[in-house]
């Protein structure tokens, strides 16, 4: 049986520490996984280190663990991918975020665009962001990442294009002259990747991206759904320039 990994938002964890897991962790370990005293699990706090632990006590509301060692994890991609994903409908956005984390993205920025099919008031959008953060953490627990990818605030496309970074920006375009695997950009400082919504980007948005220095790249001969395009582009980038070679 695979040893479960549990995120615990503590700034400092060290061997021999003994503490009760937070509400989410205790609920998952005690009520969902039904783990008992003496069982092993791995704790991580997003700093790049795993902390193998053993359960020392289980009650209806709390699970107490004792850390046994600290293990530095080095499975982050050398290619820092900042995904700018226009918010998609239903479970598509959640699916994209989950799989993007598994594929090794460093940051995720939800975007609004002209053809974005999701328009939410501020309170509901904040709840969505909380839900996306939980999906990111859950994906890290599953895939073995010990660094939590950053979820940026929702931005407009123009704000994302003005993002203060030296990473070049890529925009998928069905008539681009260069494929994503054949481009000549220097990605040593990472890459920003724009993925449009189900309706794509408007012509004005495409021209805006072009005016901001965004490179248009071709993904393939077929039109892909937004979630397929995101995961395909990330996979190609990781295969050509990251750690999936």
Image (cartoon, rainbow, N blue to C red):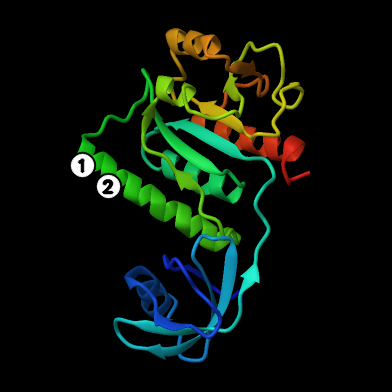
Q: Quadrant of the N terminus?
A: bottom right
Q: Secondary structure at mark 2?
A: helix
108 sits to left or right of 128: right
- Residue at x-position 49% and y-position 65%: 45
| Image x and y of residue 158, in percent | 42, 19
Q: Is residue 55 above or below residue 88?
A: below
Depth check: give the residue in front, 116 or 72: 72
Tell me the tag on residue 123: 1
Q: Quadrant of the C terminus?
A: top right
Depth check: give the residue in front, 101 or 19: 19
Q: CA distance from mark 1 to mark 2?
A: 6 Å
| Image x and y of residue 66, in percent | 49, 85
Are there few (<14), some (14-19), or many (20+) residues within 10 Å of tag 2?
A: few
220 sits to left or right of 114: right
In the rendered image, which residue does mark 2 sit on?
Answer: 127
| Image x and y of residue 229, in percent | 57, 30
Quarter of the figure with residue 142: bottom right
Q: Are marks 1 and 2 in contact (CB under 8 Å)?
A: yes
């Amino acid at each position: 049986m695979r040893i479960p990994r549990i995120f615990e938002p503590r700034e400092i964890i060290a061997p021999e520490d003994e503490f009760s897991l937070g509400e989410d962790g205790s609920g998952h370990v005690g009520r969902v996984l039904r783990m008992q005293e003496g069982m092993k699990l791995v704790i991580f706090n997003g700093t790049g280190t795993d902390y193998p632990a053993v359960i020392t006590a289980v009650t209806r509301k709390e699970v107490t663990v004792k850390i046994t060692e600290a293990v530095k994890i080095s499975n982050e991609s050398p290619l820092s991918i900042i995904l700018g994903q226009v918010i998609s409908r239903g479970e598509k956005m959640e699916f994209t975020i989950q799989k993007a984390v598994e594929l090794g993205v460093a940051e995720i920025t939800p975007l609004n665009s002209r053809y974005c099919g999701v328009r939410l008031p501020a309170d509901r959008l904040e709840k969505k962001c909380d839900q996306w953060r939980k999906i990111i953490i859950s994906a890290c627990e599953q895939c073995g990442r010990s660094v939590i990818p950053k979820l940026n605030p929702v931005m407009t496309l123009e704000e994302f294009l003005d993002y203060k970074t030296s990473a070049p920006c890529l925009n998928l375009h069905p008539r681009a002259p260069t494929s994503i695997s054949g481009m000549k950009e220097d990605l040593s400082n990472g890459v920003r990747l724009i993925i449009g919504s189900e309706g794509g980007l408007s012509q004005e948005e495409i021209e805006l991206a072009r005016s901001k220095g965004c490179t248009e790249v071709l993904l393939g001969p077929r039109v892909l759904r937004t979630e397929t395009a995101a995961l395909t582009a990330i996979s190609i980038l990781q295969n050509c320039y990251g750690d999936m070679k």
